[in-house]
Amino acid sequence: MANVLSIQSHVAYGHVGNASAVFPLQRLGHEVWPVHTVQFSNHTGYGSWTGRVFDGQAVDEVVDGIAARGVLGSCDAVLSGYLGSADIGHAVVGTVARVRAANPAAVYCCDPVIGDVGRGVFVRPGIAEFMRDVAVPAADVVTPNHFELDLLTGRTTTTLPQVLEAVTALQATGPRVVLVTSLDVEDTPDDAVDLLAAEGGRAWRVRTPELGLSVNGAGDAIAALFLAHWMSTGSAAQALGAAASSVFGLLRMTAEAGSREILTVAAQEEFVAPSRTFEVTEI
Ligand SMILES: Nc1ncnc2c1ncn2[C@@H]1O[C@H](COP(=O)(O)OP(=O)(O)O)[C@@H](O)[C@H]1O
Ligand SMILES: Cc1ncc(COP(=O)(O)O)c(C=O)c1O
Ligand SMILES: [Mg+2]
């Protein structure tokens, strides 16, 4: 079981950021140390929200307090997501350095939350550049969606070979493991969603049915689950299969209920024992 320092957004209502990532990790038996980068009423996909973006100092203060407990050496992973501002991003990367100094085996998983197909870029100016130039190079594991992969690598990928080239280019900047979510390439059927994981010069794909819903927070859940399974199995391929199956089960239940928010609590068994598991194919 791992100790995961999770630095992400928090919402009071619904499930994105830490409100999506923390519970699945706990349900799998991991300890989570959540630090919030923003506290909003709800996710920004609604178009309006209240609450505030914290700053780098606010993040540093909480990490200082954790360090004062003398426990940074037992932190196994730092997970970051929606940052709020580039200033917060610098605090996250500074935290990663502090954790690595205390525990050289600790890993950093960066979910480079920038935007999505259709919605475009939904974070503040400067965040995309910060992710590309600072956070991603510092990470061991990154979990972009297809839109973010293209943005980070300055490419437009429409075929699997192009995606593999982009992933290799991203790995050349630092991270050894890459998970690409919501992959839509030429051979992806209209009614399917692909996901791809790459590590050590190998790559694997999982294909699931596409569900008739559009929700926020699935990316935050899958990044947390992928990191947790990658740490516990040491295999990107196994982590891909487990994380994709769990998130599919979560979203299938959400679609059946017609809910606008993902059913993180009601679907909790899916994190432990997914009702349907998908085949992982090496490509
Ligand atoms: N409509 C959908 N149907 C099936 N799976 C989905 C759907 N939306 C999201 N997912 C699953 O959740 C994963 C993460 O969602 P995604 O939208 O890529 O993350 P993000 O919110 O970071 O953009 C996808 O790779 C896919 O496996
Ligand atoms: C506050 C906040 N955090 C995180 C996210 C990321 O959500 P997703 O997992 O859909 O990328 C969003 C997206 O709307 C958000 O508004
Ligand atoms: Mg995302």
Image (tube, rainbow, N blue to C red):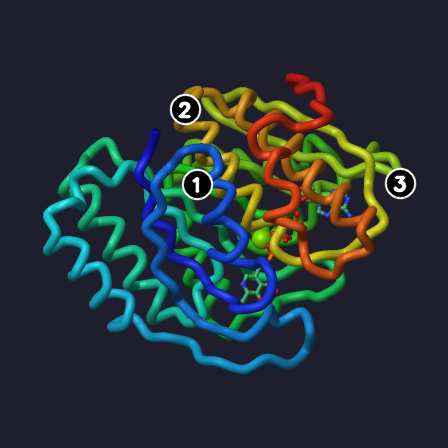
**Tag 3: Cα neighbours inside 10 Å, few (<14), some, or many (≥20)?**
few
SS state under label 3: loop
The mark found on residue 232 in the picture is: 2
Q: Earlier in the sequence, mark 1 or mark 2?
A: 1
Identify whether 178 is placed above or below 218. Answer: above
SS state under label 2: helix
**Tag 2: Cα neighbours inside 10 Å, few (<14), some, or many (≥20)?**
few
Task: Choose top left, top right, bottom left or bottom right for residue 215.
Answer: bottom right
- 88 vs 110, left or right, is left
Is label 3 or label 2 in front?
2
Q: Nearer the viewer, residue 218 or 107?
A: 218
Residue tagged 3: 190
Is label 1 or label 2 in front?
1
Q: Residue at x 28, y 36 (%)?
A: 76
**Could you tell me the amino acid type at mark 2?**
Ser
**Could you tell me the amino acid type at mark 1?**
Gln
- 240 vs 91, left or right, is right
The mark found on residue 26 in the picture is: 1
**Could you tell me the amino acid type at mark 3?**
Asp
